[in-house]
């Protein structure tokens, strides 16, 4: 329990109250106000790692006791290094720059080129201007290190994106002295995330521009350290406006989540580092071993480890989840597709409290041309199946679908309103009709035959891979440019680029949407097997594992007998959405797609033979040979 509290307080230089520690120690800490402090005192007082601050009424680590001084009285050492690469390597440091700040004033500077063990690559030379000719006669890091450590002395280390710089410096310090240079330090990037909410860009350049600072000596160690120092001054002033006047409060601020509460994940990092780098699903549990959350990942270790970092992208609900994660279990899957399907099944079965309804499903959208008798409508749907003359998609989001819809409305003027129309001349057109994006059949301004001709023109355009739409956009762009309406021409050109990108996707997926009956054979990565998926009428109706071609044939026969209402092994709506998104984003060499006859009560013998041969060919591929 003491080690658990030690880990917790390592992220809290300002310490923690008795109530915080009791919540950490016990699920139900009790309500006796006199007993609670005594329990914590009894546990921590014998351990020299902990110290009680009577002024603040908080327990903290002894190593943080010196950080209780006022910011205005503190000493900071702002450091920056230039390196030959991005992977921590003590021999990769090629320049160190540092600025010493005492009582709010710059009192010293440190600048030294260092001879690395290898030449800097061309990219680094171009970025920093530091060449091998400048480095080859410089001292090695071992010669420079004592002077740098003497310059730092008792100062609080500060850096921008400090985890990068300190990873190099701590590694070097362990080599030369056996101990890290600093376990506790300030990161101006993390502070900016908490103190500069008005911008999402918090690099040195962006913050310098925000605070009106001059960028002199950029991408050289001392130049960047001086810029970081000026940024630090501005951040400390903002912190004072929040009532934070001590160093330990500033140190604690950088460990807060977006919700303003201290960030902490009880899940041991050592557990996460043992997870596999494979696709699968993961389950998080609380201290009472109750299921909290189910998620999927294409790389389980990387995905779960993301919960250990205090990312600004974590929502308040995710941060609350993170503070309750005590253990994790994983289930490996043969592919990302299977992981997504397993996640949907498990969420529907277990209903974990931190899984929001449908949030686990990928975002997809379709444009659908309806089957209304005289005036078919064009609309947006998230369902990959249903009655329609034609489905266009899957698109990556509703926003993408709305953009494509707006392009086609300008060209073809089809209606988007619901229901069957009874045209009436006295009807008042909607906003879309008033702005010229609809031919207004509701007010009888277009005959059914003329409207049907527009529908057919759109269907022909789609069948020709958008040729008419591309021509329209090019003509409209050039017309606007000739009129010197350059901003409008640029918007049309952006629509053209957007439409071209969609057309390349439709060339691959078009037949899937028109026929909606197909078989997907997806090789498993680590064994000689295939995952088979059958889609009928746009819905995923069955899936299984195939080890031999004959198994595929017998399984397909069973699918035919169950159709069109096969046994509901899983939620077909969720599964169909997941499969549609996977097909949209899949790599060219990911599995084989085979057409199925629209009449699915029987499969022709010749077709069965073709499927079996394809299956055997995939199973014999070298990448499916089981590893020893």
Image (cartoon, grey):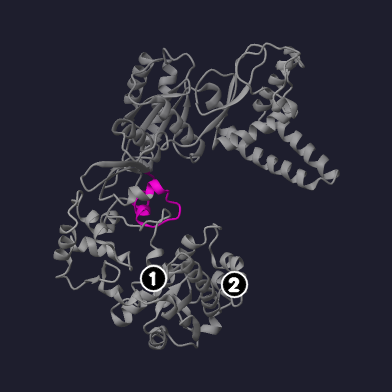
Q: Looking at the image, which residue is at 33% across and 68% down?
A: 13
Q: Looking at the image, which residue is at 64% across and 11% down?
A: 373
For the record, the magenta segment spans: 297-318
**Can residue 6 be seen at all in this image of the molecule?**
yes
Q: Nearer the viewer, residue 482 or 601?
A: 482
Image location of residue 100, percent across then percent down: 46, 83
In this image, 192 relative to 28: left or right? right
Q: Nearer the viewer, residue 469 or 159?
A: 159
Q: Residue furthest right?
A: 483
* Magenta span includes 373: no
Q: Quadrant of the N terminus?
A: bottom left
Q: Nearer the viewer, residue 474 or 235?
A: 235
Image location of residue 35, percent across then percent down: 15, 58
SS at badge 2: helix
Image location of residue 472, percent across then percent down: 76, 33
In this image, 212 relative to 542: left or right? right
Q: Within 10 Å of the Cα at label 1, are there few (<14), some (14-19), or many (20+) other Cα atoms?
A: some
Q: Within 10 Å of the Cα at label 2, are there few (<14), some (14-19), or many (20+) other Cα atoms?
A: few
Residue that label 2 marks: 126
Residue 177 position (above or below residue 367): below
Residue 207 position (above or below residue 267): below
């Amino acid at each position: 329990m003491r080690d658990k509290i030690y880990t917790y307080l390592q992220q809290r230089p300002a310490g923690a109250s008795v109530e915080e520690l009791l919540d950490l120690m016990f699920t139900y800490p009790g309500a006796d106000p006199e007993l609670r402090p005594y329990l914590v005192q009894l546990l921590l007082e014998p351990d020299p790692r902990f110290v009680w601050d009577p002024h603040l009424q908080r327990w903290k680590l002894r190593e943080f006791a010196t950080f209780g001084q006022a910011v205005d009285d503190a000493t900071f050492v702002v450091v920056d290094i230039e390196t030959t690469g991005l992977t921590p390597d003590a021999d990769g440091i090629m320049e160190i720059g540092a600025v010493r700040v005492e009582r709010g004033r710059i009192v010293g500077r440190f600048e030294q080129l260092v001879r690395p063990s290898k030449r800097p690559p061309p990219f680094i030379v171009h970025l920093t201007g530091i060449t091998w000719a400048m480095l080859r006669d410089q001292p090695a890091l071992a010669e420079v290190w004592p002077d740098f450590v003497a310059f730092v002395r008792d100062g609080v280390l500060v850096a921008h994106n400090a985890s990068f710089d300190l990873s190099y410096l701590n590694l070097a310090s362990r080599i030369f002295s056996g101990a890290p240079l600093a376990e506790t330090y300030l990161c101006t990037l993390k502070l900016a995330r908490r103190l500069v909410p008005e911008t999402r860009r918090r690099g040195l350049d962006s913050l310098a521009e925000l605070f009106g600072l001059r960028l002199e000596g950029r991408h050289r160690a001392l130049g960047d350290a001086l810029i970081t120092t000026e940024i630090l001054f501005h951040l400390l002033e903002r912190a004072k406006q929040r009532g934070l006047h001590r160093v330990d409060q500033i140190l604690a601020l950088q460990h807060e989540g977006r919700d303003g509460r201290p960030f902490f994940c009880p899940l041991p990092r050592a557990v996460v580092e043992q997870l596999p780098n494979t696709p699968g699903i993961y389950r998080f549990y609380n201290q009472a071993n109750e299921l909290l959350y189910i998620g999927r990942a294409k790389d389980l270790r990387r995905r779960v480890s993301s919960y250990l970092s205090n990312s600004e992208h974590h929502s308040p609900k995710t941060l609350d989840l993170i503070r309750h994660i005590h253990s994790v279990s994983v289930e490996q899957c043969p592919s990302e597709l299977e992981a997504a399907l397993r996640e949907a099944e498990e969420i529907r079965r277990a209903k974990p409290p931190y899984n929001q309804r449908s949030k686990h499903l990928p975002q997809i959208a379709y444009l659908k041309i309806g089957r209304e008798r005289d005036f078919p409508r064009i609309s947006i749907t998230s369902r990959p199946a249903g009655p329609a003359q034609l489905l266009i998609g899957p698109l990556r989001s509703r926003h993408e679908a709305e953009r494509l819809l707006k392009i086609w409305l300008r060209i073809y003027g089809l209606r988007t309103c619901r229901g069957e129309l009874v045209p009436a001349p006295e009807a008042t057109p909607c906003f879309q009709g008033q702005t010229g994006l609809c031919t207004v059949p509701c007010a009888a301004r277009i005959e059914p035959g003329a409207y049907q001709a527009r529908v057919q023109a759109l269907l022909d355009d789609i069948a020709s891979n958008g040729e008419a739409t591309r021509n329209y956009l090019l003509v409209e762009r050039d017309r606007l440019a000739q009129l010197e309406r350059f901003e409008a021409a640029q918007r049309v050109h952006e629509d053209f680029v957007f439409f071209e990108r969609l057309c390349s996707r439709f060339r691959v997926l078009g037949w899937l949407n028109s026929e909606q009956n197909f078989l997907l054979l997806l090789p498993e990565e680590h064994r000689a097997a295939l995952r088979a998926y059958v889609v009928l009428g746009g819905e995923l109706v069955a899936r299984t594992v195939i080890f031999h071609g004959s198994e595929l044939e017998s399984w397909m026969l069973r699918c035919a007998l169950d159709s069109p209402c096969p046994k509901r092994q899983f939620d077909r709506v969720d599964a169909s959405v997941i499969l549609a998104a996977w097909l949209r984003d899949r790599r060219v060499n990911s599995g084989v797609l085979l057409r199925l006859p629209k009449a699915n009560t029987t499969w022709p013998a010749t077709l069965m033979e073709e499927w079996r041969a394809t299956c055997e060919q995939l199973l014999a591929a070298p990448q499916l040979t089981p590893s020893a």
